[in-house]
Amino acid sequence: MKSLSVIPDGESTENTSAPLYSFCKAWAQRYIRQVDAAGATEVIQTRDDRAVIAAKLQQDLRSVSVKAWGKAEHLLEKEIIRHQIPSELIDPWGISQDIYRIYLETLNHYADGVAPERFAIAIAGQIGDLRHQYTVHDPRVIGFASMQFHYTGQLLLQGLPFDQRTGLNLYFKAVDDHLYMPIQRTYQAAANYAYDDPQLRTVRRLLGSSSSIAHRIVDQVLKAFPNHHCYSGPLGATQVRISSLRDVEMFQTYLWVCLLENSISAVQRELFPLCTMLYPVLNVRWELVRYMLMLLDHELSRQLDARSWKQLREYLNSLRVMFSAEVFDNQVCFA
């Protein structure tokens, strides 16, 4: 799998296909908007400040990764057995080594002052390779790996004073996003299209709105289920909200893959098994998922013209059928 790298300002893009470059650029612009949104509350840090923070977290990285493994194992041990995932496919020590390497590079980029949106593109190839490695034999393995990565980032941030977390959060979010979402697969599928092909135009149109769509949907889900508590706390809690936003964006990204690949395979082989393994232990009720998909239907229909919406809705309808009450027999995820 070919890694993507950041294309510096002013550098020729003749070796990069126009569709792929446009998609990468749109993804980077999405991160710029997130950086701008975070900037209002972020404490300005000098390069020396970042170097000190990075050095501290690099020292903590190995021990934190071990704790993250224990937390992920505690949550998923029964699910791994229930889903009959062969134990030899999950190598916690190998995943820990990957975590150490990726987070070490992340902290180095942070210390060097690389902008979060540029880091998000630069790291895409490496994490895309890891994601392929984790999913090639059994896509459900990504559930264990992504959870261990996620908890590593959380535990690292918890070791910092609150005012030092905001800027670093954006770098860790990039790692999280690339693991949970098939971003590299989207890049590869996009490269098969001409710049003005309708499928690619649709994805570029939605990519620019994906974050705002996620925010509106999460706000409405919170209003509809104000008393629901997930594993990490109530829906309105900061960390739960961050995870909820990521999940709504994850569903959108899988829809883009379906459209670009002209196949529901990514949802059938990855997204659905991943959700059925993770959501029960995280106390995410299927009722919430169905409500989110209904809201996503409304949001996307407003974003697209009739032809584009007809193409995409086919895959969204498939998702709604897969997560329907008939499939789950109205069961609650978490006992």
Image: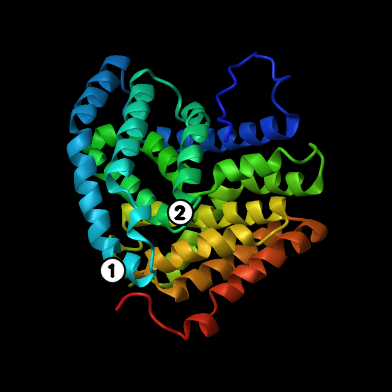
Q: Position of residue 203 (x, y in %)?
A: 69, 47
- Find out whether the residues at labels 1 and 2 contact each other: C-beta distance under 8 Å: no
The residue where tag 2 is placed is 245
Q: Position of residue 11 (x, y in %)?
A: 65, 14
The quadrant of the rendering that contains the N terminus is: top right
Q: Is mark 2 on a helix, strand or loop?
A: helix
Identified at 59% across, 57% down, the residue is: 266
Picture quadrant where residue 6 is located: top right
In the figure, is residue 267 to the left or right of 161?
Answer: right
Q: Where is residue 16 in the image (x, y as percent from the top left)?
A: 69, 25
Query: Residue 78 — which label?
Result: 1
Q: Can residue 167 be seen in this view?
A: no
In the depicted structure, whether residue 271 falls above or below residue 184 = below
Q: Position of residue 39 (x, y in %)?
A: 41, 32
Identified at 27% across, 19% down, the residue is: 51
Label 1 or label 2, whichever comes before in sequence order: 1
The coloring applied to the image is: rainbow
Would you call the spot at circle 2 few (<14 residues within 10 Å), some (14-19), or many (20 or more)? many
Identified at 45% across, 61% down, the residue is: 274
Q: Nearer the viewer, residue 38 or 264?
A: 264
In the depicted structure, whether residue 132 falls above or below residue 245 = above
